[in-house]
Amino acid sequence: MPFPFPDVSSRPLPELISLKGRRAVVTGGAQGLGKAIALRLAEAGADILIADLHEDAATAAAEDLRARYSVNAVGVRVDVTDSASVAAGADIAVAQLGGVDIWVNNAGIFPNVSLLDMPDEVWEQVFAVNSRGVFLGAREAARRMSATGKGGVIVNIVSTAGFKATAPGLAAYVGSKHAVRGLTKELALELAPLGIRVLGVAPTYVPTEGNIAATQAALEAAAAAGVDVTQLDVMQQSMIGRIGTPDDIARVALFAASDLSIIMTGSTLLADAGETI
C-alpha cells in the first residue's frame, strides 16, 4: 500500500514552510550554493549537518548557522564519492541531530576540459562526485529515513545542464547532471512507498565561488581554442532583468524541502530565470 502522505490543505502557511523539529544534511554546504541553502533551511527552523570535503570550512559554516538562528548545527568532513564517508556523515547526523528528515545533495564539480583533451580520470571524477555522490547520499538518507517510519525529503541539486548542453568543455558535467535528473525520477519511484519524496532543483548560473572560477576557466579555454566567447553567454542568460543569486536558488530548495511541495515528487524544478525557454 502506498505511504499516505498527508493532506495539508487545512494547515496555515507559516506551519507549512516551517522546518522546526526537522534535521537536514547539506552536502557541499560550507560555501556557495550549499551554504545559502543551509542558511534558509536553518532560518526555517531545521537543525543542520554541513557535510563538506573541507572540514574547517564546514565547521565554520555550522558555527555561523548556530550564531544566526540558534539551531543545532554540526560541520563534518564528508567525501561524497566514498560510501563509507557518506554513511559516517549520516550516522553523525543521527547521533548529534537525532535523525535525518531532509538531505540535500548539493556537492558538485565542473572542470572545463574539451572532449578531445579530456583524460579518463577527469570524466570519472566528475561522475563520481556529481552522480555517484547523489546516489550514495540518497541511499544513506533513505536508509535512515525509512528506519523511523516517518519518511523525509531528498533534494538533488541538478543544473540547467541537466536539460541541455551549456558550453564547450563541459561534456562530463552535462552528462553527469542529465544522470542526476534521471536518477531523481527513479528515486522518487522507489522511495515513495517509504514516505520519502525526491525533488530536483536545477539552477541557472549564479555567482558562487565555484561558478565564478568555472566561468573564467571556460572563457579562457574558449579563447585558446578560437571559439567565439559569445557562445558562453548562455551561462548567464536571464529573462528577469538581473542575474540570479545563491539565495534565489536556496528559496526554491526550501520550498522543495518543506510541506509546501508535499504533492510533488520526481520533478526537477527549473530555477533558471527563463534560461531554458
Image (cartoon, rainbow, N blue to C red):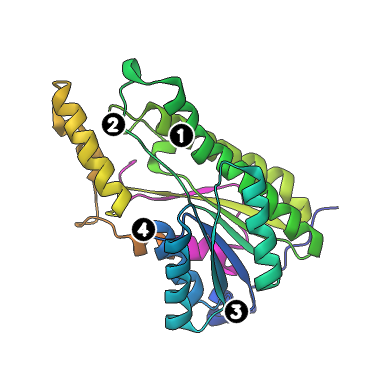
Between the residue at mark 4 and the residue at mark 2, the CA separation in whole angstroms equals 21 Å
In percent of width and height, residue 162 lies at 44, 37
Range drawn in magenta: 252-277
Between the residue at mark 4 and the residue at mark 3, the CA separation in whole angstroms equals 24 Å
Give the image quarter of residue 104.
Answer: bottom right
Between the residue at mark 3 and the residue at mark 1, the CA separation in whole angstroms equals 35 Å
Residue corresponding to mark 1: 126
Residue 32 tag number: 4
Which residue is at a point 73% across and 61% down the rendered structure image? 151
Label 4 Cα neighbours within 10 Å, binned few <14 / some 14-19 / many ≥20: some
Q: Depth-wise, is mark 1 or mark 2 nearer the camera?
A: 1
Element type at marker 3? loop
Q: Amino acid at mark 3?
A: Lys
Q: Going by the image, does 183 lie left or right of 231? A: right
Which residue is at a point 69% across and 47% down the rendered structure image? 139
Which residue is at a point 14% across and 27% down the rendered structure image? 223
Check residue 264 for magenta coloring.
yes
Which mark is first along the chain, 2 or 3?
Answer: 3
Choose between 277 and 243: the one closer to the eye: 243
In the picture, which quadrant includes the C terminus? Answer: top left
Q: Are marks 1 and 2 in contact (CB under 8 Å)?
A: no
Residue that extends furthest to the front in the rendered view of this protein: 56
Q: Depth-wise, is mark 4 or mark 3 nearer the camera?
A: 4
Q: Amino acid at mark 2?
A: Ala
Q: Are marks 3 and 2 in contact (CB under 8 Å)?
A: no
Residue 68 tag number: none
